[in-house]
Image: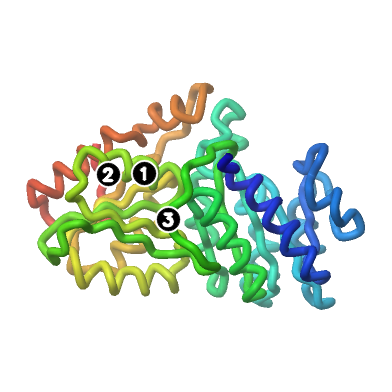
Amino acid sequence: MTLPGRAAYRDELTRLAAENERIVCLEADLGGRGHPFAQAFPDRFFNVGIAEGAMIDMAAGLAAAGYQPFVSTFAPFAALRAAESIKLAMGYYGAGITVVAPYAGVSGAWFGTTHHCLEDLAVLCAMPGITVAAPYGEREMRAVVRRAARTGAPHYIRTGRNAAPESLPFTGDEPPVVLWDDTGATAQRTCLVSAGEVGTELCLAVRRARPELPHAHLCLLDRAHLTLAARELARRYDRFVVVEEHRASGGTASTLALLLPGQVVRSVDAGVRWPSHGGSHQQVLDELGLNETAVWDALAACDERQPLAASVRSR
């Protein structure tokens, strides 16, 4: 059975902690009963309650003492409420803290605006020195967690709520840049680019209908890693449709547009409106216009050879 991202994180961290006594786990009142890390290593698990900034500060102290802290709370509270602590501890001081943030995007759905987070990439990617990841599927989440443990570098890992997409076909500890391109041709073509769970699901759905479309799936989304990805993409294609569960401002598409000044970069994203109705994750996405139809519209605009545009909305 495929695990959701947040469950895969907990399981993988517990496995790693069995071999690494320096790993500690902190959570902000979302552990619940039966947390595998708390059961296996109760003396290395800390539930700090709804004190997200203090949790990051505690983790900074633990990192300074030689531990490897992994902390977790909802994405809006990690990226926004604790932003100053993350900036100073993980950015400025470079403390080896890993933040795992479920409920990213609008995966909280009916919980409402307080539990939505469409701004975290903009906030975290503005802080140099932090690796920002949006894994897709259990296998990729496990790889990102292993990477964070292995490198000891600051990481921010966003994931959804309960979605459990099929894992991508790769092995190893390094999250991949996955490129599907069955034609082998280069340049003068549109490439789908996906970031995160929703963006990847939408691109995979479109590509099932048009398998000739190239599709690049990106997991590491900070400026340093996107720079490497952009170099490879620019060698192959001249038009891009970037799909992500984030606002256009500060998202993956806007960064790639800056890194690909000679190419067309169009963004399919969550827009600028606040969701005003509750419902399922899919219902909230539909209200924001982030769905398969929006991807097809963006592809049609690229096929029509629209003028060069950076992060242009496409519906």
Q: What label sits on residue 313 in the rendered view?
A: 2
What kind of residue is marked 2? Answer: Arg
x, y percent for residue 168: 44, 53
Which residue shows up at 82% across the image and 45% down it? 49
x, y percent for residue 95: 70, 74
SS assignment at label 1: loop
x, y percent for residue 127: 55, 68
Q: Nearer the viewer, mark 1 or mark 3?
A: 3
Which residue shows up at 48% across the image and 25% down it? 276
What kind of residue is marked 3? Answer: Pro
Which residue shows up at 80% across the image and 72% down it? 67
Q: How many marks?
A: 3
Between disc 1 and disc 2, whose residue precedes?
A: 1
Q: Is residue 167 above or below residue 295?
A: below
SS assignment at label 2: loop
Q: What label sits on residue 169 in the rendered view?
A: 3
Q: Which residue is mark 1?
A: 269
* Residues tagged 1 and 3 counted as in contact (Cβ below 8 A): no
Between disc 2 and disc 3, whose residue precedes?
A: 3
Q: How far is mark 2 from mark 3, CA to CA?
A: 31 Å
Q: How far is mark 1 from mark 3, CA to CA?
A: 26 Å
Which residue shows up at 53% across the image and 54% down it? 139
What kind of residue is marked 1? Answer: Asp
Scheme of colours in the image: rainbow
SS assignment at label 3: loop
Q: In screen coordinates, is 151 left or right of 262?
A: right
Q: Is residue 163 above or below residue 96?
A: above
